[in-house]
Image (tube, rainbow, N blue to C red):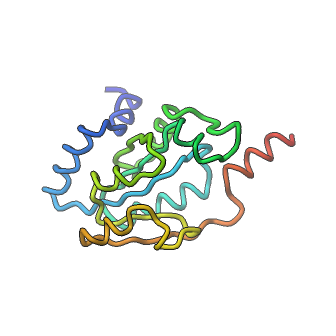
Amino acid sequence: MTNLEIIKKKVFKRDDLSRQLNIWRMQSKKIVFTNGCFDLLHHGHIDYLSKAADMGEILVIGLNSDSSVKKLNKGSNRPIQNENDRALILSSIQFIEAIILFEEDTPLELIKMVRPDVLVKGGDWKESEIVGADVVKANGGTVTTIPFVEGYSTTSIEKKIKSS
């Protein structure tokens, strides 16, 4: 099996992820979930994802589909990279175990399916605003935020490229 085939195995369909989550749970693995667009992967993303991964043993990423990114009004050119490319890039990161695309406006249904032990979001979110926080806490999990690394954002990278 090639390296590319190996990393592509980290991108799951819902039924397949549900089965894999059951295996991880039977192995008593602590499951961490976060979500985002991860359009132009940068230092801030890696810092955030690394810290999220350190909170458990299995890091699951809910990745906004292209249509879902468009609904977030991040700009007319977004996403810059398509969902398959973004998923492949995330898959190549060693500490990420699973990536799943979602089409919905929010990851709520995905969070209900994953039932993470830890739900993580960026520091710009208040716990009361985090989608699925109530579900995770009702299942005995925790919700946490990770501060941003200042000076890094996909929007600032996009602006820098356009001004060159």
Residue at the image position 55 percent from the left and 47 percent from the top = 38
Residue 20: quadrant of the picture: top left
Residue 10 placement (x, y as % from top left): 35, 39
Q: Which residue lies furthest to the left in this view?
A: 26
Q: Residue furthest right?
A: 164
Residue 161 placement (x, y as % from top left): 79, 41
Residue at the image position 67 percent from the left and 49 percent from the top = 154
Residue at the image position 25 percent from the left and 72 percent from the top = 140
Tag count = 0
Residue at the image position 43 percent from the left and 63 percent from the top = 52
Residue in front for this viewpoint, 47 or 116: 116
Residue 134 placement (x, y as % from top left): 35, 69
Left or right of 53? Residue 47 is right
Residue in front for this viewpoint, 71 or 16: 71
Q: Specify the quadrant that holds the N terminus.
A: top left
In this rendering, is residue 48 above or below 6?
below
Residue 164: quadrant of the picture: top right
Left or right of 81? Residue 141 is left
Residue 119: quadrant of the picture: bottom left
